Image (spheres, helix red, strand yellow):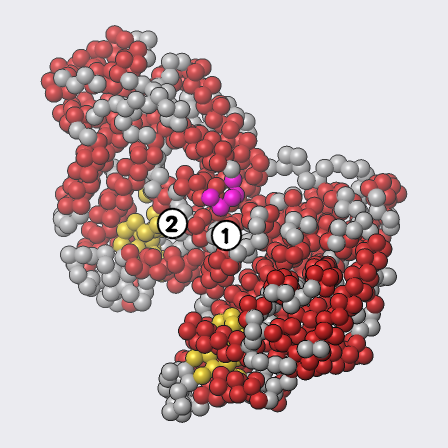
Amino acid sequence: MTARDLSAPDRALEPLGPDALAARLSPEPARTSARLDAVLADAPDLAALDLAHPLLARVAEGSPFLWGLIERDPDRAARLLATDPSQAHDDILARVEAASRDADRAALASVLRRARAETALLVALADLGLVWDAFEATAALSAFADAAIRAAARFALREAHGAGKLTLPDPSDPETGSGFFVLGMGKLGAGELNYSSDVDLVCFYDGQVAPVADPAESTAAFVRVTQTLTKLLQERTAEGYVARVDLRLRPDPGATPVALSRDAAMIYYETVGQNWERAAMIKARVVAGDAAAGEAFLSELRPFVWRRSLDHAAISDIHAMKRQIHAHKGHGEIAVAGHNLKLGRGGIREIEFFVQTQQLVAGGRDPALRTRKTVEGLGRLVEAGWITAQARDELIEAYAFLRSAEHRLQMRDDAQTHSLPDGADELEAFARFAGFETAQAFGEALTRRLRVVQAHYARLFEDAPPLAAEVGNLVFTGEQDDPETLKTIAALGYREPSSVSAMVRGWHHGRYASMRTARARELLTELGPALLAAFAQSGRPDEALFAFDKVLERTQAGVALLALIRANPQILSLLADVLGAAPRLGETLARRPRVLDALLDPAFFGHLPDRREIEERVAHALGDARSYEDTLDRARIVGQELNTLIALRIASGTAETAEAGTAFARIADVLVTALFDAVTAELRAVHGEVPGGAAAVVALGKLGGEEMTAASDVDLILLYEHPDDVQESDGRKPIAPSQYYARLTQRLVSALSAPTSEGVLYETDVRLRPSGRAGPLATRLRAFETYQADEAETWEHMALTRARVVAGPKAFRRQVGRALGGVLQAKRAPAKVAKDVAEMRALLDREKASGGVWNLKHAPGGLVDVEFVIQALQLAYAAERPEILHTSVLPALSRLKEAGLLAEDDFKPLRAAASLQLDLTQALRLAVGKTFDPEAAPAGLKQLLARTANAPDVKVLEAELSDVQKAARAAFKRVMARLKKG
């Protein structure tokens, strides 16, 4: 065993080579020297090791427990010091593995206790000799505990088999197929066991798997197995013990047996499981028993631990646990003498909670955060954007220091202690044992780390500055307005102080269901001043606050919403801005307040999600679905989250409006594809497949053009094909292909638009299929091509210029794409196209052009004029110039200009009209839905529109919009006139 150079800055404790070790010994060298000489005199192998003298002197002074192990067997100490510690550790594990096959209880107990003593000495020497760091030490301790628990479990299962209580499939491999499994919790589960830690175990059995002789005696049989296992580990004999066992982390430990049915456990977690139990299960790991049964249980438990929409009151629960620890144990301040390295301020538990709470918040959405290990968790939080690399590095360095100090504290007497000595002399002795020259040097190093940890923890949890900052007198008790409160509200900038006072007073009195719990009102009392101050700073305080009132009125989750705001103060200012500007978005949040969870994603203020990120999010959301109906609900939840995320970014100005159409369309593409796959699987389960058949979904309109808004419907048609000789599907209920694909279409429309408990995903329109409402729901591709060639009118071909294949098998999608291209590239007379387009525009002018300039789609010079120009030119000239085809307005305009088919004087006004009105449409649809009345619009919405158009105010914007539309209408007329001339 050779000490390494440990002077690198990331080392946990001060470097101690042999010379340094010798220099930092007791002030009583004579006593230490005598003890050391007595051992070395009887152990020549030990005396011959250079490193042994200073290292053993340090142990003799600082650790009665370790010195006792050395005195009892100095040859063992010599062997460990002379051997590579990793090899020595492997040898110990091999002996335990071999003993686990022994049917003799006494022999196994003896091997385990000798192995534990050897492991304790090995880890201590490797740690004190600076050969292993804190994490290598914890890994070695955990690996031994795993091996010992597994050996004890194997013996206990074989004993039950021998007693006729179990009938194991293979007694030589008692764990496999036993149905009994042991979960390691806490530091054992994480593989981070400390030097003298208890092992936290939870024992379950799967009644469907367990080979119990009498099923009625299942619990009794596995209780006996657990008791045997526990006794083998913690019973003290002349050779010591293996591990102290704690079984209290099982469900309701005061009322349940030590071995519990996994079904009973699942019912408990799903119905009354607590937030602290969710946090504990982050680290749960199968350490012994039937691994397959254990992993299946943990997999089924995932939705309990990793919730997609977290009640943020859970975070308050976890932090409350920490505050209670401080209050009960008196660990309110950072100290050195008597400080608890685990539970005290800035201690190990704060680092662990720092990781676990953020895992609970984000792990439901991001599986990469689901790691048991603390250091690994910190690294993954950096990768996911939740913390900085600096925070990770500082916390890992502090964690290593604290874990090393904790180990040396426990090495002294093999006691599960975490508190530093109180007395000055004892603290001085411990500091030397820990590798420091003085207690002062140790205290300075410790305090520096504790303060770093406390600072990071406080930023995550604590109120600095508090949300409820003092803004003036605010009293909302009683039935009457408090005069001083009205003055404070007016001073904040509210136009109607009395209305605001009455509104807030109603919240406190539980006027809304969301405010009727004591916890909701407690949070409101705490947050009230901050709420009023934040909405006051939005520039539209009354409108914003009244919109928030609607959220509280309509949601049932008042505690969740207020706890979310309390845990994330930045959300409050964002809500204040958005609610004043976008009433429709406020109503969305009122109906589905859980979509606010999307704001906690670090990616919120980054780029808008690309296709791959959306696919991963949707796949994860639907992956744990337990039924088809659950799939539909989950699709609606993830769709609402993603769409609201984009809407909030547009409303808050953190994303460009021009990006929104593509982002909304990406989400719809992925969800339509996912649900198409789901309904196909459902149909296949009943009716089988159409042999050789295939179907594809074609998007048209806003989805096809990738210009969707927050309020867009989806226009779809379904095309299919199959061999002529196939008459029916091949399932248990065969049906004709036409009927098969019609049902597939019906199911897809229902999957997208049917209301479930989570609402509607998209309103879906299939009327653009051939023959409209009179035609079949699904169209055979061959019939579609014939119809388009022989019967379709110009307006139907115009609709196909925005057609895009979004779902279906890749080969068939390409076939459909070629068919669509064939329709659009058919040779047409430009004059005929112009005549039909002009007539259609004249009809729309008569029927839908009212509403003034804010009728952005149908007003003269509105988006329809731009789209009709593009579609007319594409239909007239795509036969010769297929490169002009594009489903989106702005790229299509550019292609037409590059092809020389659109003059510069026409391109510029059309592009300006398209760009401005597409942006304004995005803003309006997320704010007010379908209709807009500029006279009745709130000031915040007008400011949003002005900001979207880079205009100083809405009046200037209206004038600009009018000019742009007039220029676009003139360009439309010029293009049509030229087309009529051919």
Q: Earlier in the sequence, mark 2 or mark 1?
A: 1
Q: From the image, tell me which residue sits under label 2.
A: 284
Horizontal relation, residue 130 to residue 506: left or right: left
Residue 538 point in image, percent of width and height: 76, 46
Q: Residue at x 49, y 74 (%)?
A: 817
In front of the other: 941 or 403: 941
Place residue 771 in its image quadrant.
bottom right
What is the CA distance from the residue labelled 2 to the residue labelled 1? 15 Å
- 385 part of magenta stretch: yes
Query: Is disc 1 placed on a helix, strand or loop?
Result: loop
- 938 part of magenta stretch: no
Place residue 445 in its image quadrant.
top left
Residue 761 point in image, percent of width and height: 59, 69
* Observer able to see residue 545: no
Q: From the image, tell me which residue sits under label 1.
A: 274
Provide the residue span drawn in magenta: 383-387
Three-letter residue code for mark 2: Ala
Q: Which quadrant, please, contains the C terminus? A: bottom right
In front of the other: 493 or 796: 796
Identify the main secondary structure in magenta. loop
Three-letter residue code for mark 1: Gln
Q: Residue at x 35, y 16 (%)?
A: 432
Mark 2 crowd level (few <14, some 14–19, many ≥20, 10 Å Cα): many
Residue 508 point in image, percent of width and height: 75, 51
Q: Residue at x 62, y 56 (%)?
A: 659
Q: Which quadrant, please, contains the N terminus? A: top left
- Which of discs 2 and 1 lies nearer the camera? The answer is 2
The answer to whether residue 252 is above or below residue 760 is above
In front of the other: 838 or 377: 838
The answer to whether residue 844 is above or below residue 183 is below
Query: Is disc 2 placed on a helix, strand or loop?
Result: loop
Q: Residue at x 38, y 13 (%)?
A: 437
